Amino acid sequence: MRSFFILLPYFTFHLFLLLLLTHFTSYTFSLCSQHDSSALLQFKHSFSVNTSSKPGFLSMCSSFSFKTESWKTGTDCCEWDGVTCDTVSDHVIGLDLSCNNLKGELQPNSTIYKLRHLQQLNLAFNHFSGSSMPIGIGDLVNLTHLNLSFCHLKSNTPSTISHLS
């Protein structure tokens, strides 16, 4: 009987650890802000991605991939290719869709401008059909790095770009 009382604290402690472990492994953590996830998915659907051919200007890319293929509803956008999130606030702070063969127009009302915490945006080596750089780029007031090289944008630069840091 005495050995039972000696082993009881060890047994209780291990049972507690097992219950704690079961609780935390069954609970899923989502780092991505729902607002940011929705904005990214809408942005993705505003373009087409030509997966069948690689245009000549993409030969300048050291790596070529279709990053938006990993972007799916119901998954954590912080785990998506090309997306970087702040580990504290759960907001998207970086977006690198360079060399992704996106085709379409950068619209003035694009949902990308809803990513208010965005600090880095790289859309280099895509084909934006001769679009002008949209005025909405100035809404990204936390943006510190912007790369729009080889995007087939018209040379008109909006005055709102002066709002960027």
Image: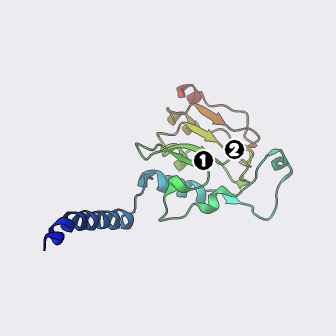
Instruction: Tell me which amino acid carries mark 2.
Output: Ser
Which residue is more in the foreground, 66 or 16? 16
Using residue 153 as the reference point, say whether residue 112 is left or right of it: left
Q: Secondary structure at mark 1?
A: loop
From this view, report whether residue 78 is shown above or below residue 149: below
Residue at the far bottom in the pictured view? 1
- The residue that disc 2 covers is 131
Q: Quadrant of the N terminus?
A: bottom left
From the top left corner, tell me how far across and down residue 132 is, in percent.
68, 40
Image mark for residue 107 = 1
Q: Quadrant of the C terminus?
A: top right
> Would you call the spot at circle 1 few (<14 residues within 10 Å), some (14-19), or many (20 or more)?
some
Residue at the far left in the pictured view? 1
Q: Residue at x 40, y 43 (%)?
A: 89
Which residue is more in the foreground, 58 or 158? 58
Residue at the far right in the pictured view? 56
From the top left corner, tell me how far across and down residue 41 is, in percent.
54, 58
Q: Residue at x 24, y 68 (%)?
A: 11
Tell me how far mark 2 sits from mark 1, CA to CA.
8 Å
User: Splitting the image into 4 quarters, where does residue 148 fall?
Assistant: top right
Q: Do the residues bearing badges 2 and 1 touch, measured as CB atoms within 8 Å?
A: yes
From the top left corner, tell me how far across and down residue 74 is, in percent.
47, 65
User: Splitting the image into 4 quarters, where does residue 66 fall?
Assistant: bottom right
Instruction: Tell me which amino acid carries mark 1.
Output: Gln
Residue at the far front in the pictured view? 2
User: Splitting the image into 4 quarters, where does residue 53 fall?
Assistant: bottom right
